[in-house]
Amino acid sequence: MRALTFQGKQDVRVDTVPDPQIVNPRDAIIEVTATAICGSDLHLYDGVIPGVMSGDILGHEFMGRVVETGADSTLQKDQRVVVPFTISCGKCFHCVKSQYSACDNSNPAEKQDLTEPLYGHALSGLFGYSHLTGGYPGGQAQYVRVPFSDIGPVVIPDGPEDEEVLFLSDILPTGWMAAENCDIEPGDTVAVWGCGPVGLFAIQSALLMGAHQVIAIDHYPNRLALARRLGAKVIDYRGTRVLEALKEMTGGIGPDAVIDAVGTESHGLAPDNVLDSMKQKIGFGADRGHVLREAIMACRKGGRVSVPGVYGGFVDKFPLGAFMEKGLQMRTGQTHVQKYAPDLLRRIQEGEIDTTFLISHRLPLEDAPRGYANFHANQDEWTKVVLKP
Amino acid sequence: MTHRGYRYRPTGPGVRNRGFHLPQVPDGAARAAALTVGAGVLLVGAATLLRATTQDHGVRDSAPGRTSRQSFHGAYAVTGRSVTVNRPRAEIFAFWRDFANLARFMENVERVETRGEQSVWTISAPAGATVTVRTRVVSERPDEEIAWQSTEDSDIDTRGKVLFRDAPGGRGTIVEAIVAYRPPGGQVGRLTAKLFQKEPAIQSRRDLKRLKMFLETGEVATSQNRKAA
């Protein structure tokens, strides 16, 4: 089959690799009909997430048609399914509590050695996202082996187009969970850093959950325009003092909840970010925490900090004093996709959520390297790339 | 439920231990190391298997002995791990007690065969070699504990036990496996060292995770995209 493989920093290629097979009883094989490049794939592309090896197949947002099922799969051939990027067994303590992204059993035991010393606990398995999360071949390919196929994949009935439901795999539930982690109350202001796909879905979700206003912070004009179209007020941080503006836009209070939808590769020339960029270039381990620092400084006393943005290592100059003295709460984590996907599918079918507005480019899988390069270099115009194998 | 492990405190050179005897070891360096350490694992008798003594003036804490900052020295290496499995205790005990099942989740164990009172373990070693370990059960409490030790003709001198107890809050069963072994000399010893000494804790950790995967999900997770040839 053809698949997009990681070769090195900012070097990805479409190669011919062996087709996957059913290996375990609960497996299914999916023929991919649509897949996407995620903003978090750019962290892999930039080499800031450790544990990515040459030849690894990337991609964790994908959907397709079932072509083969293992003995214990509940899927049927020809069913159309969206596959969550989180691999979850459905049986362990965490899965039973709907903490699917904390599954104990989806990361192969020999791969868990990598994250147990780094994070204190082993991570669960994810598709196409480094060997820290299992080294599972990803979805930017013609075929994917899907473990625990009786728990993960969401069967899509006839009706919606692939593009309308594809983002159930990651970014839509991720934006939704980011907003849910804000515990939004009537009258609340939610500030969202980053108007990439997750930030945009977080804006849409926060408004649906009843936020009084959502303020979006970015510097790309096109992305700020998308946020405004969803109903957000926007701040361009290149021209505006963000902390002062957020206070003035909330009657001197500050946002009740803040969302860091940027993560470890924040942009901008703030002194802390320039220093962090230098550290990140030197090697593994240093996260760029500018957005998280600013979000904590902005958040009102007793407010909530929601972090869907991806971090991999350590961040310094963390304003722990502000965090503690203001009595903030922080919630974060990889998304519990299986918990949210059925409800979000219903909302898509009922027209409550628009999912296609952020797609800027559609490319064949063979052109995926061009998609990566442009999504990386021209983030203003390239908001979301959908690939068709 | 209180923990059954006992905290090990080293007593230093020249401090006599109560009721404790180090096994005779042929190797001079090993003997010196063994004598330097004034305490260790008590390896006689099933009931007292793997218990360690405490320092005269030390305060015993609640942690298992294997988590002591002072690791065990001397002839025997000891490793142990716990895992919580979301299945009933009786089911897990029965699965383990059928020793042939151990090869289904232990990475280096090719097979375990029962011959009379003995279990014969075929363990894969580097470079395609295998090591044979012969053990017999020395004590057993249904649904609670199985303890074993190697027989005279075993390639490796080892003993261990596995404990099963209910996890709190309906979380299933806590499985705690503790293994002690004494690497012998010669070729087998070198293989054994490679097998176990590099990082014995890693293997037991991986194996217990595979046990959990197998019993909770019915399969052992792998990111291999194709069946092994």
Image: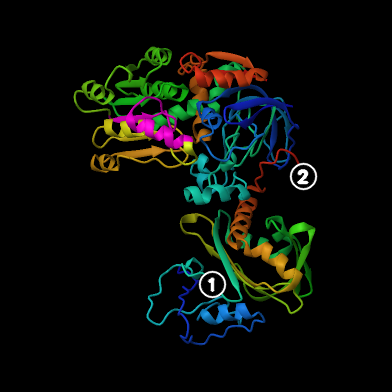
Magenta stretch, residue numbers: A256-281
Residue visible at 55% across and 32% down? A44
Say what amino acid the circle numbered 2 marks: Ala
Q: In this view, does A214 lie above or below B43?
A: above
Mark 1 or mark 2: name the one nearer the start of the chain: 1
Which quadrant is home to the N terminus of chain A? top right
- At 62% from the left and 40% from the top, the residue drawn is A135
Please indicate, yes or no, whether residue A75 appears anywhere in the rendered image.
Answer: yes
The residue carrying pointer 2 sits among few (fewer than 14), some (14 to 19) or many (20 or more) residues within 10 Å by Cα, namely few
Mark 1, secondary structure of its residue:
loop
Q: Position of residue B114 (x, y in %)?
A: 77, 69
Can residue A299 be seen here?
A: no
Q: Nearer the viewer, residue B124 or B91?
A: B124
Q: How far apart are marks 1 and 2 (CA)?
A: 38 Å
Which residue is label 2 attached to? B228
Q: Do labels 1 and 2 share a chain?
A: yes
Q: Which chain carries label 1?
A: B
- Magenta span includes A279: yes
Q: Position of residue A251 (x, y in %)?
A: 19, 23
Rendering coords of residue A183 (x, y %)? 34, 33
Residue sitting at x 35%, y 17%: A232
Residue A187 is left or right of residue A131, and the answer is: left
The residue to which callout 1 is attached is B72
Q: What residue type is labelled 1?
A: Phe
The C terminus of chain A sits in image quarter: top right
Callout 2: residue from which chain?
B
- Asked if residue B7 is positioned above or below residue A69 in the image, the reply reads below
Q: In this view, does A153 lie above or below A389?
A: below
In front: A268, or A71? Answer: A268
At 51% from the left edge and 79% from the top edge, which residue is drawn? B37
